[in-house]
Each structure stands twice: as structure tokens, then as C-alpha cells.
Image (spheres, rainbow, N blue to C red):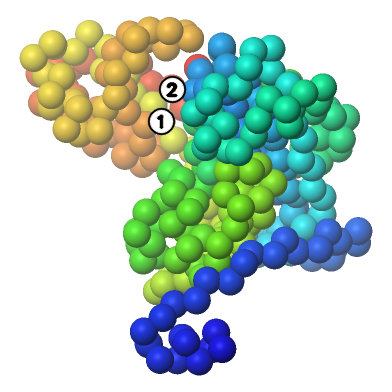
Amino acid sequence: MARHLEDTGSYRVLRKLEPPQVSSYPRADFPRRGVIVDTETTGLNYRSDEIIEIGAVAFSFNDLGEIGEVTGVYGGLQQPTTPIPAEITRLTGITDDMVAGQIINAPALRAIVGSADLIIAHNASFDRPFCEAFSPMFADKAWACSVSEIDWAGRDFEGSKLGYLVGQSGYFHDGHRAVDDCFALLEVLRRQTGVSVSTPFAELLERSNRSRVRIYAENSPYDMKDHLKARGYRWSDGSEGRPKSWWVELPEDKRDDELSFLRTEIYRWDADPPIVHLTAFDRFRAG
């Protein structure tokens, strides 16, 4: 029936995403370990809000960016110190009754995360600070972001939200529950779509291996702020050890062009703005 509907050209059928089996014996030709992490929290501020659910799905991969098998899964709830806000319950379906008395099993989670060569989150700038605030097991790991480090538009996707990616891949799933979102992202990452000859995961792996630079336009003239915003700069208020200034993050090979822009268009003198070099081990941290 589903095939008949699709063959008419008038219908598009979405199939429920079924999680893959966990393999106890990953193949030797996939020696690397990746872990997809997703968190549900009581809010957006990692310093004052708390994780109420965490999901982690481990998988094997090789240096070509080919994905092997799922090698481990963990999902756990945790009771926060304050009641879950109503808007969070509406978004996630997680209630105070569900988390009552629940504690995330740190040793079980560490057994999955500890051997990770790469941790992936769909918006790592959000998940990494929460994860590192929760436990040091997430520190000193290479992180990748499947939102910012994959050209989804170039792969003919209409947006980078996980729901869009899953739906346009022909599936539906129970969104906003941590493990389900991890499995959904894994399926999207391993599928070759659009005109690209590589999978999204291969692109993500390649981009995460590139070094980047963060340039701070410190002491830039106030009347240049609109020019900086138009070029993609963001404002740092000086918290968490960052300079109080406009800043931008770029691939390493764009550094000289950007410094030339700042010196000729913004400062109009031979300025020497602060530069921070970043790798996957540094990116997406709170500071």
C-alpha cells in the first residue's frame, strides 16, 4: 500500500525509524569510536539549569568517514533540584513524576563516552557546556556539531533542525527524547542524499579535523559595529574569559583575508587583534 501511494506521485510516505541492533563484535575495519550525545534540560543556561535526560549512542567508524555498527546505548533521566518548567514538559514530554528519584548512571555513561574518538551533538554549542558541567568525562574530548559543520542546504535539505532532516530522509521518530534523537541523527548522518558523493558523517568528520581561528575585533570603533554584524561577527560581553568585543570564527585559511578586512575596513590602521586557534578539542566549549 505504501509503495502504491508513493508510485502515484501524489503522496509521500514516512516510515517509523527503528533503532538498529547493538553489536557486541564491531568489525576490525571500523576501528574508531563515535558517540552521539543529546541532552534535555530545564533551560538554556548551563550555569543555572540542569540536565534532566541524557542519551548517548556509540558507533564505530573508519578514517574515510564510513559508519560501521552501533556498539553501545545509554539513556537516563535525572531529577533536578527544582520542578521542571511547564514549557520544558510541553517540549520534551518529561514530567516531574517521570524524573522523581531518578539519577543518571555515571559509570554506565562513562563506559560509552570514555573511549570516544569524537563526540557529536546536534548543536554542540548547547550540549557541550551542559555535558562538561555535568561531568569531567566529557572534557578533553574532540567534539563535532552536526548543525554547523554540515552543509545541509547543499544536500537539498530545507533546514538543519533534526525534525526536518529526519522527515526529508523519509522517516519519523519520537522527537525530543534523548536516545530517540541520537538514533535519528545517526540514521541521517549515514545516509547519502542529494547530489553529494559523500555521506553527511564523512563531511562532518572532515570538517571537524580542520583547525579554525577565532578573531576578536577588540577595540574596534563603535560606528563599525553594523559592518561587523553584517560580516557575521557576534558580540562577546567579556564573560568566561573572552575579550569584550565582536568576534568571528573562521577556517584557518581565511585568517589572513579577515585580518586584511579588519585593518583596511574597520580599524584603518595596522591593528593586531587577538586570535585564538581552535581544534575539535576546543570548539563549542562555554568559554
Q: Mark 1 packing: few (<14 Cα in 10 Å), some, or many (20+)?
A: some
Q: Would you identify the image quadrant in which residue 62 lies?
A: bottom right
Horizontal placement of 117 versus 255: left or right?
Answer: right
Q: Is residue 37 above or below residue 130?
A: below
Name which residue lies at 57% across and 17% down. Answer: 49
Q: Position of residue 67 (x, y in %)?
A: 68, 62
Name which residue lies at 42% across and 51% down. Answer: 160
Outermost residue on the right side: it is: 24
Name which residue lies at 82% across and 22% down. Answer: 101
Q: Is residue 284 visible?
A: no
Outermost residue on the front side: it is: 97
Of residue 74 and residue 251, the one placed in the foreground of this image is 74
Q: Quadrant of the N terminus?
A: bottom right
Q: Is residue 235 visible?
A: yes
Q: Position of residue 259 (x, y in %)?
A: 24, 28
Q: Mark 2 packing: few (<14 Cα in 10 Å), some, or many (20+)?
A: few
Which dot marks residue 276?
2
Name which residue lies at 47% across and 71% down. Answer: 193
Of residue 248 and residue 253, the one placed in the foreground of this image is 248
Q: Is residue 38 above or below residue 4?
A: above
Which dot marks residue 213?
1
Do the numbered discs 2 and 1 sit on residues whose CB atoms are within 8 Å? yes
Q: Position of residue 132 (x, y in %)?
A: 66, 22
Name the residue type under label 1. Answer: Val
